[in-house]
Image (tube, rainbow, N blue to C red):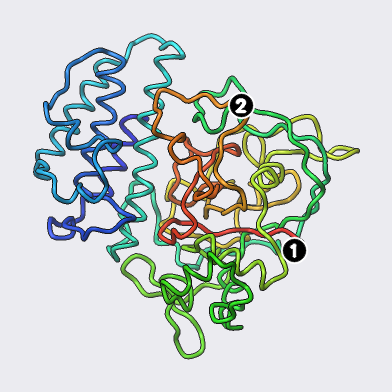
Amino acid sequence: MVLDSRKRSLELLADLTDEQLRTPLLPIINPPIWEIGHVAWFQEKWVLRHLRGEPPILSQADSLWDSAAVPHDSRWDLPLPSRAETLRYAQQVLVRVIEKLPAHEVTENKAYFHWLVVMHEDMHGEAFTYTRQTLGLAAPRLSGSGRQADGSVAPGGDCSGDVFIPGGHFLFGAKPGETFVFDNEKWAHPVYVSPFAIARTPVTNGQFADFVNDGGYRRHEFWSEEGLAWLKKEGAEHPLYWFPDSGGWLQRHFNRIVLLAKDLPVIHINWYEAEAYCRWAGRRLPTEAEWETAAAAEPASAGIADCRRRYPWGDDAPTPERAHLDAASVGCISVGAREAGDSAFGCRQMIGNVWEWTVTDFHPYPGFVVDPYKEYSQPWFTSAYKVLRGGCWATRSRLIRNTWRNFYTKDRQDVFAGFRTCAQ
């Protein structure tokens, strides 16, 4: 896993020229060379320095790559090592980490740190994929990926409409015994979920286009006060990367302009846009607990069974037949595909393809205890962040599960995020 995660990081960088790597200062990205140095530093900090007690490889490493101490905007002005020097440092760290891996099974405490650095690098790999889209760079060339997924994937069977989820008590969150979970998933606790109906699939481009074509971005009655302030500030008239074309729509996919494929999930939608669509459609966003219930619970004769699945389809690990993950193709696929990944209630693609916004603010679960990596969750427990669930096409399959909580501010459009809706 350590080698595979680093391989993906390097592939996301390899084809870019030095000129392409000189990115403008934007609040939603990091300088690419800084980012590769940061993931190597993080690996060194937790596995070599914290776990093994080794001294820093570079004396200035903390002042360059500690994201908790180095303000975002200053990262463009740092005296960073060159591309070659940064890659050399990253390789030094990787080699030492591999050398220090014990031949026998590691303890649970030590395994946490090895898992942590892999998960951290996987998340930065996904973020770097967002960066390539943000900057209009070519789609990444990744091992194991097929052609670009631009809408030509077979759509699968009809999966329109809602599924009904009976009410009941549900064990919400991760249970002890998992190989690795983040502190914001801990621990499972009972919640009562009222009966609800949720869409079988995420909202599609075609459905969202109906909202846009009906003046959705001009009709202020669909926008909250906060959403309207965002709308006016940005001057948005349609989703990011959409372009009108002879009564229809085009979309930018990395550095290519393609026809908007109606059966793909709408993507690069922020929380305000999702909220406005729901008001237009007479729908609503699911709560985080509703989302997880639809993904993980099983039906019983009287409500919800006293069991829960690790993934929508069961406890077996993700496969390409069940979920569109790992950038198996570079971009989204039809919302009707991957029937084998349906939840017990018939919801499709709750894992993979596109992240899904929920209505829930990002807050800790009862009894929250911070993990050693204190900066991961605790600083962001505010109503400024909303929870997203389910992963996207670029998410690594070893990272995602039904309980995994992503979180972003409500204005973010660069994320590979869409949403599904519930009946009012």
In front: 146, or 318? 318
- Dot 2 falls on a residue whose secondary structure is loop
In terms of image quadrants, where is residue 414?
Answer: bottom left
Mark 2 or 1: in front is 2
Question: Compared with residue 60, is residue 346 higher up or lower down, i.e. above or below?
Answer: below
In terms of image quadrants, where is residue 79?
Answer: top left
Residue beneath the point at 44% across and 46% down: 326
Q: Name the residue under label 2.
A: 187
Q: Where is residue 398 in the image (x, y as percent from the top left)?
A: 47, 35
In front: 287, or 104? 287
Q: Position of residue 301 (x, y in %)?
A: 90, 38
- Dot 1 falls on a residue whose secondary structure is loop
Please identify the residue farthest to the bottom as the structure is shown: 246
Q: Name the residue under label 1.
A: 161
Question: Compared with residue 58, is residue 202 higher up or lower down, i.e. above or below?
Answer: below
| Picture quarter with the C terminus | bottom right
Q: Is residue 309 left or right of residue 111?
A: right
Tell me the distance, in whole angstroms, between the alpha carbons under discs 2 and 1. 33 Å
Q: Is tag 2's residue or tag 1's residue first in the polypeptide sequence? A: 1
Residue beneath the point at 46% across and 53% down: 409
User: Could you tell me the amino acid type at mark 2?
Assistant: Trp
Q: Where is residue 412 in the image (x, y as percent from the top left)?
A: 44, 58
In front: 372, or 355? 372
Residue beneath the point at 33% across and 62% down: 134
